[in-house]
Image (cartoon, helix red, strand yellow):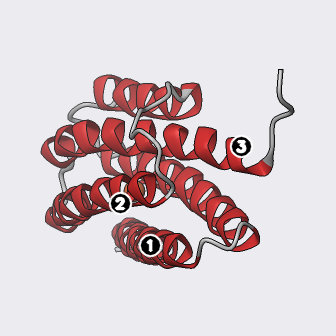
Amino acid sequence: MAEKTLNDLFYETLRDIYYAERKILKSLPKMARAAQSEKLKNAFQKHRDETEGQVERLQQVFEIIGKNARAKTCPAIDGIVEEAEEIMEDFKGTPALDAGLLAAAQAVEHYEISRYGTLATWARELGLKDVVKLLEQTLAEESKTDETLTKIAETAVNQAAQKKAA
Ligand SMILES: [Fe+2]
């Protein structure tokens, strides 16, 4: 059996994030429906649309490297999404629901940022310039989403604090 290389690792990790993006694409509308704050609903909807583009970018990457776009089950994202579903169930109708959804969404973003950061580094090492560009575009979107979620979280926290002070 031939020794596995960084090329193989890159392909396997690409399949992992491809699975993750498609899973998130299905999960975001549910999270948008569950969210109580309009801001949070909008953020989830916007990111759902962005995620469609991210899936397409990954398909372009598979094409550039001449491999099949075949997803590989990613237990990490399955677990994160499962936890988000638990929060939706357990905190339904409570004031803490949005805080829980925010935390779950940020866990998703941080997972993706970690994956895309690694993939972009490997693509650079492998001399795949066009691939680096595509991955970095997505990485920038994920980071921006993470920042937006942080802002929403801080606003919500401030509001809660103000209520307490009043
Ligand atoms: Fe994504």
Task: Give yes or no for contact between labels 2 and 1 (Cβ–Cβ under 8 Å).
Answer: yes
* Amino acid type of the residue tagged 2 in the rendering: Gln
Nearer to the camera, 49 or 147: 49
**Of pointers 3 and 2, the one earlier in the residue sequence:** 3
Seen at 13% across and 43% down, the residue is 33
Q: Which residue is mark 2?
A: 60
- Within the image, what quadrant is residue 122 found in? bottom right
Seen at 38% across and 46% down, the residue is 21
* Whole-percent x, y for residue 160 in the image: 38, 65
* Amino acid type of the residue tagged 3 in the rendering: Leu
Seen at 63% across and 68% down, the residue is 120
* Whole-percent x, y for residue 86 in the image: 39, 24
Q: Which residue is mark 3?
A: 9
The answer to whether residue 122 of the structure is visible from this angle is yes
Q: Splitting the image into four quadrants, where does ligand 1 fall?
A: bottom left
Nearer to the camera, 109 or 15: 15
* Amino acid type of the residue tagged 1 in the rendering: Leu
